[in-house]
Image (tube, helix red, strand yellow):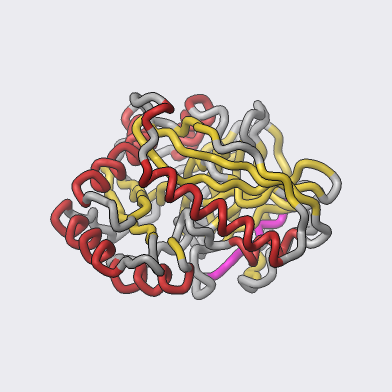
């Protein structure tokens, strides 16, 4: 049994569709510049939403396959849930700021959930079983705290020698609805992300193939997804070109980032950043459907795409659907 503490630096993950759980335990952690994705050495990278926050490389000094492990975190948090009235005011402010030249912004909120379970391992294992097609991750650094999640969204992932996959994932609805019920708002949201990725890959002069838009399940919700496949000898330049995509900030990117800074009453830190294992194979996923773990409390991070067609009360409900993906797991451990 590997007994981990708040002093350790490690990452545990399960790739989509795999059975194998892997753990990288590091003797020391390298803080890396945001511009340097540090992709060649075997390890696990943690990158934030904004370059102002620190980025880290967790070296695979010790590599375990399907380990028996336990991690009980004693970290304290001072986070407040956002009220519905404050959230609705934020969304109204976002809608008012949008225009034909500024069609979309992603706005998010924090939700604090009380938990009795102390062992984070049990939550990770529940996510692995419940979401076989997600990237399930847990990383802990004294510098960042403990982050756990089940992300449905690849940013960049290896598919062979110099061959990579990136994904446009945008447009959300409850899973109880049928795939024929996608509305114009959700399709527009998705197409903006598609056009953004097309533009970035064209700018980098990388020929690519684009799959058909299709529906995928992610916990209690469904998303529209389009896959992009391409070859490059420099995946770092693709990461720098894509992150953050309109799926997590909005479009145009600079205007969206400014509005997020004005309206969101907290710093996202690693929510809507990206993380994953690197080395011979690279598997980087956007840090979504995630939570920050504290002693007796969990902070969920949830957001949605806001357009001029958005209805604030509906957006509130959408964040509740998304939160339920993780709340279901927390309630059953």
Residue 32 on image: x %, y %? 65, 70
Q: Is residue 235 left or right of residue 167?
A: right
Q: Residue at x 48, y 26 (%)?
A: 130
Which quarter of the rendered picture does the C terminus lie within? top left
Residue 74 on image: x %, y %? 39, 51
Q: Is residue 160 above or below residue 55?
A: above
Q: Is residue 151 above or below residue 9?
A: above
Q: Is residue 13 left or right of residue 87?
A: right
Q: Is residue 54 left or right of residue 66?
A: left
| Range shown magenta | 54-61
Q: Is residue 250 above or below residue 318?
A: below
From this viewpoint, which residue is outermost toward the left?
85
Q: Quick check: can you spot residue 27?
A: yes
Q: Quick check: can you spot residue 24?
A: no
Q: Residue at x 34, y 50 (%)?
A: 299
Q: Nearer the viewer, residue 230 or 115?
A: 230
Q: Is residue 248 left or right of residue 137?
A: left
Residue 160 on image: x %, y %? 82, 42
Q: Is residue 65 above or below residue 154?
A: above
Q: Nearer the viewer, residue 183 or 300?
A: 183
Q: Residue at x 39, y 55 (%)?
A: 75
Does 59 appear in magenta? yes
From this viewpoint, which residue is outermost toward the right?
161
Residue 132, quarter of picture: top right
């Amino acid at each position: 049994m590997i007994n981990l503490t708040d002093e350790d630096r490690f990452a545990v993950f399960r790739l989509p569709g795999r059975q194998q759980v892997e753990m990288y335990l590091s003797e020391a952690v390298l803080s890396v510049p945001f511009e340097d994705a540090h992709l060649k050495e075997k390890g696990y990278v943690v990158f934030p939403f904004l370059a102002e926050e620190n980025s880290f490389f967790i070296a695979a000094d010790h590599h375990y396959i399907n380990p028996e492990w336990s991690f009980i975190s004693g970290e304290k948090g001072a986070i407040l849930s956002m009220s519905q009235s404050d959230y609705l005011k934020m969304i109204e402010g976002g809608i008012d700021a949008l225009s034909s030249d500024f069609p979309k912004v992603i706005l998010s909120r924090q939700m604090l959930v009380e938990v009795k379970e102390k062992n984070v391992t049990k939550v990770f294992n529940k996510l692995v079983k419940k979401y076989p097609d997600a990237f399930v991750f847990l990383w802990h650094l004294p510098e960042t705290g403990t982050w756990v999640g089940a992300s449905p969204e690849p940013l960049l992932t290896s598919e062979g020698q110099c061959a990579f996959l990136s994904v446009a994932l945008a447009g959300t609805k409850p899973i109880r609805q049928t795939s024929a019920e996608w509305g114009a708002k959700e399709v527009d949201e998705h197409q903006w992300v598609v056009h953004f990725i097309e533009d970035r890959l064209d700018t980098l002069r990388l020929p690519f193939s684009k799959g058909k838009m299709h529906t995928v399940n992610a916990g209690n919700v469904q998303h529209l997804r389009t896959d992009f496949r391409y070859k490059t000898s420099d995946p770092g330049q693709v990461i720098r070109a894509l992150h953050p995509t309109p799926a997590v900030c909005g479009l145009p990117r600079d205007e969206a980032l400014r509005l997020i800074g004005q309206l969101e009453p907290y710093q996202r830190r690693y929510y809507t950043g990206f993380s994953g294992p690197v080395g011979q194979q690279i598997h980087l996923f956007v840090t979504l459907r995630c939570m920050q773990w504290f002693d007796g409390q969990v902070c969920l991070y949830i957001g949605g795409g806001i357009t001029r067609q958005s209805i604030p009360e509906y957006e509130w409900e959408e964040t509740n659907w998304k939160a339920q993906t993780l709340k279901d797991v927390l309630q059953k451990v």
